[in-house]
Amino acid sequence: MAENKISKKEKGLDKSKENLAALVEATPLLEYHKEALTEIIDKDALLITARGLGIHEILHSLIRVYHAPENLVIILGTETDQEIWIRHRLERSGMKNTPKWITSDAFDVPARTKLYKEGGVLFVTSRILIGDLLHKRLPAEHVTGFIINNAETVQHSQQDMFILRLYRDKNRTGFVKALSSCAAAFTQDFMQLNRIMPKLFVRHLLLYPRFHQTVKDDLAVVSPTVYETSVPLTTLMEQIQFALMELIEITIRDIKKLNQTLNIEELNTNNVLGKSFFAIIRTYIDPQWHLLSSRVRRSIGDLRNLKKMIDGVTCYDPVTYLHLLRQIWAHRSHGHEGQSDWAMMDAAESLYQAAERRVFRKKENKKDSIKTLKPELCPKWLALAELLRTCEPQGAVVVLVEEERIRKQLEEYLCLGEERVHRTAYQKLFAETEENVDFPEEERVKTTAPENSLSPTTFLVSVSASNPFAFEELLVEVRPRSVILFDLHLSAVRTVEVYQAMFPQTHVELYTLMYVKSVDEQRYLNAVQKEKVAFTTLIQEKASMASRNDWDNEMNIDRGESKVIVDVREFRSDLPSLVHKRGVDLCPGTLEVGDYILTPAICVERKALQDLIDSLCSGRLYRQAERMSLHYETPVVLIEFSTLEAFSFKNKLQSEMIQKKTITRLVMLTIQFPKLRLLWSPTPHATAELFELLKTNKPQPSLEEALKITEKELKHEGGSLDRFNSKTMRFLEALPGVGTHTKFKIMRRFTTLRDLFLAEEDVLLDVFESRDKTAAFIQAARGPFERRGKKRPIE
């Protein structure tokens, strides 16, 4: 039987290689695409390319190579939008039976089992895949391999790493191939690559930066003609940008000065301009948040607002930007950390005045100060209108912008003119709050874009639309003569280069619009430099890496017979993966009581900090503790903190009042349920270690017994839990011979305590099911009482 499975896999892999040869011949791939595709099929490797070089073309090719009944290949790490676009591309290329996306709503258990047997390539959600692997609905031995898309995100997902560990635990011959186009994500920590590759179970690293020789040669054969349009900032925009840069530098200096322990190298002006700045520094700030002073917390919040304002200078029109500034200005003194320091500086006053002058022109009257709505024209809008007048006669034009809101606004501007755009924005944002505003007569207004100036051959697309690949799709469908990058992105420039190389018959003219000496220009240059440094670091690490990066140490775990019963809803968290990594087998099931059953006596209800607060407020935790006490001798509430949270109740989103109420309710809960134990854990890793210690030398739980405890059985055994008096239950527990299950038998069998104490011995033996326990109870209930203490004299 084993030989048949191996031979079937070998036949499938041989056929995949034949499919690869045919695919390379039939598909119009660039040489570096073919080279990378051949390498990653031959090896278990992590492929990292520069942004915009078309790594999805390699993913499409891998799907077409392995999509056959002889194979069963699972794709991880793909978002829903990407999956829809991939299937659309495959259908357009002629594939009739495209890979299916398996979700719990679309496919039940029998349907999924049938799909697994049919083979091919499948997209499966992580939670479903974990359950199917643990329940053996999908035997790991039958899986040909895994393709990991967006590997830079998978490294932070314990669920996906858990899936790969389950797979490698049973299947050492299948393949794992990981793809990523974000080199910087693998160089954020010291020697991060050497830690990630064993967890992905790949042995080789493939790097394709923009300066790779094959990439340079491919893109140099036919390259687009590039025209750089430098747009100068207006005087008021320069004033706003200068003031904001000054405020950002002061705020960063204050943060470093006020807290010496917060040593963050990334905290500098250049990095603040980056898109993912706050996502990066959160990993440093959140664990120390409770140690920071209120002024440092306020400064961090100020930095976030200042970044939002400086990004909006070149992004928003003057009316929208003034509204954004006023919103932040209005809330500067209402935050829970106190009034912002930057708002009282001279630079802030200069910033506010310049933003108002971009929208209003003031006229001093004898009685009132009248403002005339006369917004400043956006220089980029004027430059775009001029470029369109030049490019539209030559053929189709594609304009790329950053946000969907900006795309709609540009369409309105090109069709109706800037005056109508500003009027619409003003009516929407300021009509109810502004007074003494004079509007110029419409017939006197000169527009830079006449009505209906948007040609039918001009297409505007945003990179933040629901379809992340809308730009690439539009290029292939429209085959434009000109491409205008209204917002310059590194990946967009390379996408046009790749498109030109793949379709050399259509020569493309690429126009870029960039504000001179602006934060946009600095952000673009920083992105180029950051990617170059990241690839240089990866190349050096690859050179010093062992020739064979072995992941066998990840699998050398002695599992034994230890097991834990886990509620299937818990697989959304990282804890099951970490418990399994410590050599404990997991038995998934739908539990009505508890989240984890460690032993026949220990039941654990896991609570994150916010969930704990909500459960205490709603009373849900009281009911959960009551149910656990009903069926288990040692009920446990696990209070688990995140890796990015401080191990403290002092949370940045909670007030002192909430913290005090939470502690008070926890104390009342432990008083109400004396057997209840609270387990505190700083991280999921610590929780997994605690579980292992609690299970030491203890019997293993039974999944069948745990699944018997359902709401239906509770009602069948005597109605709701509120039927039993908690004081009576605690009294019975104090009697000799009465255990957790015995007390409920007693309360269902006898109406009063008198009936219990006067019952015959045979009746009690039927309840206690043990002669020793029955004798101990009779001795305590009917034996002579010993008086303790001195008799109090009668006065």
Image (cartoon, rainbow, N blue to C red):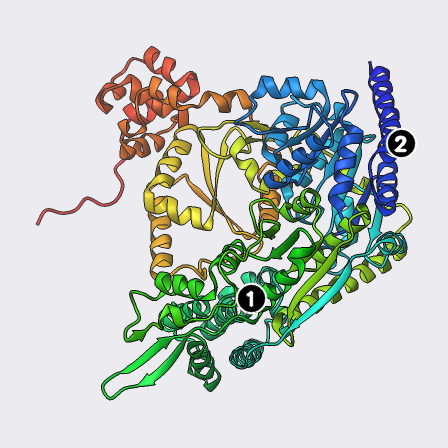
Residue 195: percent from the left, percent from the top? 76, 51
Q: Judging from the image, what secondary structure is the residue with disc 2 in?
A: helix
Q: Which of 243 and 39 is in front in this view?
A: 243
- At x 39%, y 69%, the residue is 443
Q: CB under 8 Å between callouts 2 and 1? A: no
Q: Distance between the residues labelled 2 and 1?
A: 49 Å
Q: Which of 65 and 563 is in front in this view?
A: 65
Type of amino acid at the residue the image marks with label 2:
Ala
Residue 32: percent from the left, percent from the top? 86, 47
Can the viewer see residue 739 in this picture? no
Closer to the chain start, of discs 2 and 1, is: 2
Mark 1 residue crowding within 10 angstroms, few (<14) / some (14–19) / many (20+): some
Q: Is residue 248 left or right of residue 755?
A: right
Residue 263: percent from the left, percent from the top? 63, 72
Q: Which of 361 and 245 is in front in this view?
A: 361
| Residue 734, placed above or below residue 210 | above
- At x 68%, y 52%, the residue is 395
Give the image quarter of residue 57. top right
Q: Residue 541 shows which numbered tag?
A: none
Mark 2 residue crowding within 10 angstroms, few (<14) / some (14–19) / many (20+): few
Type of amino acid at the residue the image marks with label 1:
Trp
- Mark 1 highlights which residue? 381
Can the viewer see residue 738 in this picture? yes
Which residue occupies the extreme bottom position in the image? 366
- Mark 2 highlights which residue? 21
